[in-house]
Amino acid sequence: MLKTAILTAEETNVSIGTLLIKGLMDTNGDYYVGIPQISVLFSFPIKHASRDIKALLYKDSPFPKDFIKLKTSLNFKPINAIPLPDFEHLLIVLDRVKNNTLAQRMRDSLVGLSLHQLFCDAFGVKFEAEDRQNWLKARLLTKETFWFMGAAIEAYYKANPRVEKYQGQNYSEPFDALNLGLFGKKSKVIKTELGIGKSALNRDHFGEKSLKNIEMIQRIAEAQIKYHGNKPVEAVKFAIALMNYPVSDFKQ
């Protein structure tokens, strides 16, 4: 068996929303996350962290990868590390299969940005190889989950019940605030302009730029509702103020 090469890696802080992790970059310019840090973040027993993480990442592969050995200033001995795409895959597995709350928070924070972009920013590397718009477009929500913030709204009002003035008010208020903030028009006005009456708005009614902005606002608002207990309509207003998008045509 060939001996695994040990590479030297530079480290820097990488912000993922409100979280901060230590990013690694080897002499070839490739990015990694260290197994010791993953162990701490996601509560893998340090003694068996490499084995357990490898089992999650490569359980369906007949030829599981070996982890990269990196020498850093953070550790006396070289550490095991996984490439950035594998770390992204690990977040997905931890979120979907293990229902890991931290993985969910990281994935929520990353909507609209790729981890590669964040690492490039942190290391001061120009990012031109990926087409950001295509990346975002590939991750836009399907019609069925266009208003994915609905689950967070439902959970909020189960915990904070109130008497509604009319059926659906809990959902229409934040969506009106979203459309008013982004497009200067409430949902009813947009429907009138589109001539769709009482039919529900979906992604086919909005342009690519608008969809990107809608998704980002919903992701931020959803996190505010889930993790900070904010009232849905206030969470949407917070997200709109934070992103400060100029009012635009919803068809753009």
Image (cartoon, grey):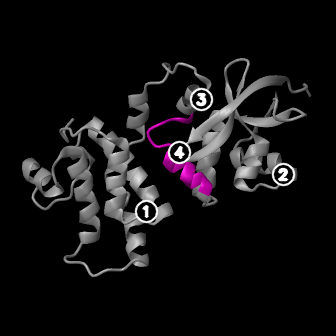
Q: In the figure, is residue 180 to the left or right of 67?
A: left
Q: Nearer the viewer, residue 174 or 30?
A: 174
Q: CA distance from mark 2 to mark 4?
A: 26 Å
Q: Determine the secondary structure under disc 2.
A: helix
Q: Amino acid at mark 4?
A: Gly
Q: Amino acid at mark 2?
A: Ile
Q: Which residue is mark 2?
A: 46
Q: In the figure, is residue 231 to the left or right of 45?
A: left
Q: CA distance from mark 1 to mark 3?
A: 29 Å
> Which residues, given as a range, are shown in magenta?
102-115
First in residue order: circle 2 vs circle 3: 2
Q: Which residue is mark 1?
A: 225
Q: Which residue is mark 3?
A: 122
First in residue order: circle 1 vs circle 3: 3
Looking at the image, residue 162 lies above or below residue 99? below
Q: CA distance from mark 4 to mark 3?
A: 13 Å
First in residue order: circle 4 vs circle 3: 4
At a point 81% along the width and 37% down the height, the residue shown is 80
Q: In the figure, is residue 220 to the left or right of 17?
A: left
- Main secondary-structure element of the magenta-colored stretch: helix
Q: In the figure, is residue 234 to the left or right of 226?
A: left
Crowdedness near tag 1: few (<14), some (14–19) or many (≥20) residues, C-alpha within 10 Å: many
Q: Which residue is mark 4?
A: 17
Q: Quadrant of residue 162?
A: bottom left
Q: Give the percent coordinates (x, y) of residue 233.
A: 31, 62
